[in-house]
Image (cartoon, rainbow, N blue to C red):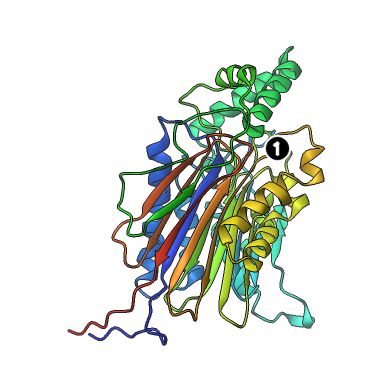
Amino acid sequence: MLTMDPPDDADWSCIFVHAGAGYHSQSNEPQHLQACALACKAAMALLRNGGSAVDGVEMALRSMEDNEITNAGFGSNLSLDGTVECDASIMEESGRSGAVGAVDSFKNPSAMARLILDNSRRPMSLKRVPPILLAGPGAKLYASQFHFPIIPNDELVSHSAHQRWLKWKRELDGPRGAGSSNSRSRRSRSRSRGHTRRDSTDTQRSSVSNATAKAEVREADAVPEDADAVHEDADAVPEDEDLVTDTVGAICVDRWGRVAAGSSSGGIGMKFRGRVGPAALIGVGTWIRSDNDGTVVATTCSGTGEQMAHTMIASKAVERMFESDDEFNGLKIAIEHDFMGSNVVQESNMSSAVGIMAIKFDKVAQNRRIHFTYGHTTDSMALAYQSVAMRDADSIMSRNKRNPKACMGGVLVPILPTQITTG
């Protein structure tokens, strides 16, 4: 059997995933990291067998959507009326994309986004333009026309998500509901705006797998610590309870160096029906840019959706990294200046948080490697990556010492020459 080499004698296959930015409890950390590792494993199985970058992104997102521990697909946060509504998108390096918003009848919204992406290439009668984003009932009608599986909404509701909804609903409906809500909001702002110290290290690596590349981690700039805020925040959430209400994401490079990225999310808990979050919005939750010289930058983001939309943070981060020789610093500027320093965040009385996962590489460089970079203002962010040269994924739980300053980390992933096998 002869295995064909890519034209440039290198197999670029890599998958990068994150399971959201927020607060991942110490007790649930293994489950979050395992979810990331399993997503990498599923995507890499396709990539090793000639799958495309879009195939890899879809498979990684579907894996996380099927895992109850994430806020995507099954087990997502519930809307105000107790139903699941999800957002998802997939974007190609070419600029094409497909997305769904506020959908309540799909086991894997990312697969529906893939269908819309694929159909965007197909001409329609009467010179109509194929849609690239469908929301709500319209997406369900579209799915039925293409025989896409439709399921009852209660099949997306997990027991733990329902229990959270019941707790939040009691707070909203009770005589002290408004006060409890405001108290929780204040504590949430304390968590996202800084002053807490959850762990003694910025980044911890999981024993699930071994890394083949050396990680480079830089500590966020120190900020003064407020003892009262620390005490209030420490009492806000039980140590075994997660506060991960954000998007999951994936970036994939296939063996030919083609790139795709995508996001999926159940959105914020107790949201209004019909709310479309950043996971469905290209340029807000996901973005890719490439040029004719072979440089590619891709991002997928997680955080406070409405503020991400106002700042177009995914596209801003890509531009910062693309134009900078130091992609690490470019991403940090995007987080601390373009997002946290924006007027909409500075003037907001709501929780403000963002987490960004990004890659940058040069397809024609002699020293072939992918710069994997991430940063977040939240307490923690769960990530993983795997190249074709790695037997297992390397999982990372990045923990922030001093938010709202950005906690940054990064890995150089080497790309090895393709081995020709015969037999």
Question: In terms of depth relative to the viewer, which is nearer, 228 or 352?
Answer: 228
Residue 82, quarter of picture: top right
Residue at (51, 44) in percent of width and height: 74
Q: How many marks?
A: 1
The percent coordinates of residue 8 (x first, y second) are: 41, 85
Q: Is residue 211 above or below residue 200?
A: below
**Residue 52 placement, left or right of 110:** left
| Residue 253 versus residue 332 in the image, above or below | below
Indicate the amino acid at tag 1.
Lys
Residue 145 showing in the rendered view: no
Q: Secondary structure at mark 1?
A: loop
Query: What's the residue at 44%, 80% (across, down)?
Result: 366
Residue 124: x and y in percent read: 71, 79
* Rendered view: 250 above or below 291: above
- Report which quarter residue 227 is drawn in: top right
Image check: 393 left or right of 342?
Answer: left
Q: Nearer the viewer, residue 386 or 174?
A: 386
> Is 286 displayed left or right of 49 in the figure?
right
**Residue at x 71%, y 15% (from the top left corner):** 174
| Residue 86 seen in the current view | yes
- Percent of width and height locating residue 60: 46, 58
Nearer to the camera, 348 or 36: 348
Left or right of 156? Residue 104 is: right
| Residue on which disc 1 sits | 271
> Residue 375: where, in percent of width, then height?
56, 49
